[in-house]
Amino acid sequence: MSRYSIVSLLRNSLSYHQNWQRAWRSPEPKKRYKIIIVGGGGHGLATAYYLAKECGITDVAVIEKGWLGGGNTGRNTTIVRSNYLWDESAAIYDHAMDLWKGLSQELNYNVMYSPRGVLHLAHSVSDMQEIWRRGNAIHHNNIASEFLDPEQVKGMVPFMQMEGRYPVMGALLQKAGGTARHDAVAWGYARAASALGVDIIQETEVTGFDIKNGEVQGVRTSRGDIACERVGVVAAGHSSVVAEMAGLRLPLESFPLQALVSEPIKPVVDTVIMSNGVHAYISQSDKGELVIGASSDAYNSYSQRGSFDIIEDTLQAICELYPQFSRMRMLRQWGGIVDVTVDRSPIISKTDVKNLFFNCGWGTGGFKCTPGSGHVFAHSLAKGEMHPIAAPFSIDRFHSGALVDEGAASAVAH
Ligand SMILES: Cc1cc2nc3c(=O)[nH]c(=O)nc-3n(C[C@H](O)[C@H](O)[C@H](O)COP(=O)(O)OP(=O)(O)OC[C@H]3O[C@@H](n4cnc5c(N)ncnc54)[C@H](O)[C@@H]3O)c2cc1C
């Protein structure tokens, strides 16, 4: 597969861009693979890429029931950061940050990682205590962040409403945080994995598992059975549905989570601003749309829509902090299904079925960890043993009580 470069751009412009090669192959599924990944979102594709690139395992298929990135990968609000509270979280989320920095070059695909900074606002004494605690905790893990006073916040976002119902008392800023282009991440990993020999099989649903003597032997799909030695399930939103096919129950709840974008306007927000207090966050896309997100719906559901009261609450919250946006029109709204654990940390784990692994439960905030998650999951699948960074996120923690409680760091902030 040829590299994207100025030369390939010029060459293809001569033929009016009619002869670009396909970004990834679409082969017929083979009868057998060494490793099958269920789910062609960013995490699944990243896993396949690192399996091929770093573990030397190219006999891999990614099986996706829809199209690549059509799940939460293409539905999220693209925020990237690593300012979680606990050491275990710092290890995995900051591992991802390290990978984000060179990802476009590594994949030869512009994932538009934009370290524009992420601001977490504090509106009360308890908010201040939370950001101080978290900011100091991540400093111990060498993750740079800064505390800003109200003057400094105002300097960064001049149009923010600093007084009133939700006074801004300070903020935690992670400068390396920001955004990345979500579907480019899926496409970049897909292209690079395919070039290394991974088979990407879209529009094929996994409908069951072939399990003998407690060990997985393959998957059943809408296009027939496929044998394999090991399976990694990365099916965010439907992890419990897939787990049930193997007779497993996961400690997950599935909720709709919504987001919306406004009509495009000239650049006004050059950072990401989050507020757990008013319960909304905002950034601006390169096209000029305000990208707005909030909390998940309060009920369990698999409908990728969400309810109207969340939209109303979210827009009210945005208008509290930025009254001038009250006159803007919203362009699009959508929802995705997020699988949430009780401690708001992911599950990256073996299961009771031998050679059947799960990577799920990323809830409202897994996009930022796509490279880190794929990287440690690939190494775990290759070895059959969990990577040290992944080990604390084993499903066993729900028995042992060794939870990694990120409730505050992942509240409305995604
Ligand atoms: C509105 C919204 C905003 C968000 N904002 C952020 C944010 O700003 N920052 C952040 O870090 N995170 C955010 N998230 C969370 C983030 O999107 C997810 O945690 C992350 O994208 C999960 O990636 P994934 O690759 O595991 O899942 P997905 O992209 O959902 O991939 C899973 C894939 O599995 C496939 N699948 C399911 N069942 C089967 C089956 N039986 N057979 C075959 N394939 C199957 C699905 O079709 C899907 O494509 C947000 C989520 C939503 C919904």
Image (tube, helix red, strand yellow):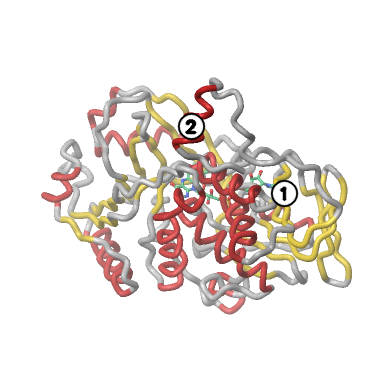
Q: Quadrant of residue 99?
A: bottom left
Whether residue 25 sits left or right of residue 408 in the image: it is right
Residue 243 percent coordinates (x, y): 73, 58
SS for callout 2: helix
User: Which quadrant is home to the N terminus?
Assistant: top right
Instruction: State if disc 2 and disc 1 touch (CB < 8 Å).
Output: no
Whether residue 49 sits left or right of residue 261 in the image: it is right
**Residue position for label 2:** 9
Residue 199: give its label: 1
- Label 2 is placed on what type of residue? Leu
Residue located 62% across and 49% down the image: 237
Ligand 1 is within 8 Å of the C-beta of the residue at disc 2: no
Residue 151: give its label: none
Q: Nearer the viewer, mark 1 or mark 2?
A: 2
SS for callout 1: strand
Q: Quadrant of residue 360?
A: bottom right
**Gap in angstroms between the C-alphas marked 1 and 2:** 26 Å
Q: Of label 1 and label 2, which has the lower sequence position? A: 2
Depth check, front residue: 220 or 97: 97
Depth check, front residue: 195 or 154: 195
Residue 298 percent coordinates (x, y): 52, 46
- Label 1 is placed on what type of residue? Asp
Residue located 62% across and 51% down the image: 193
> Residue lying farthest left?
151
Whether residue 57 sits left or right of residue 169 in the image: it is right
Residue located 52% across and 77% down the image: 402
Crowd class of label 1 (few under 14; some 14 to 19; many from 20; radius 10 Å):
many
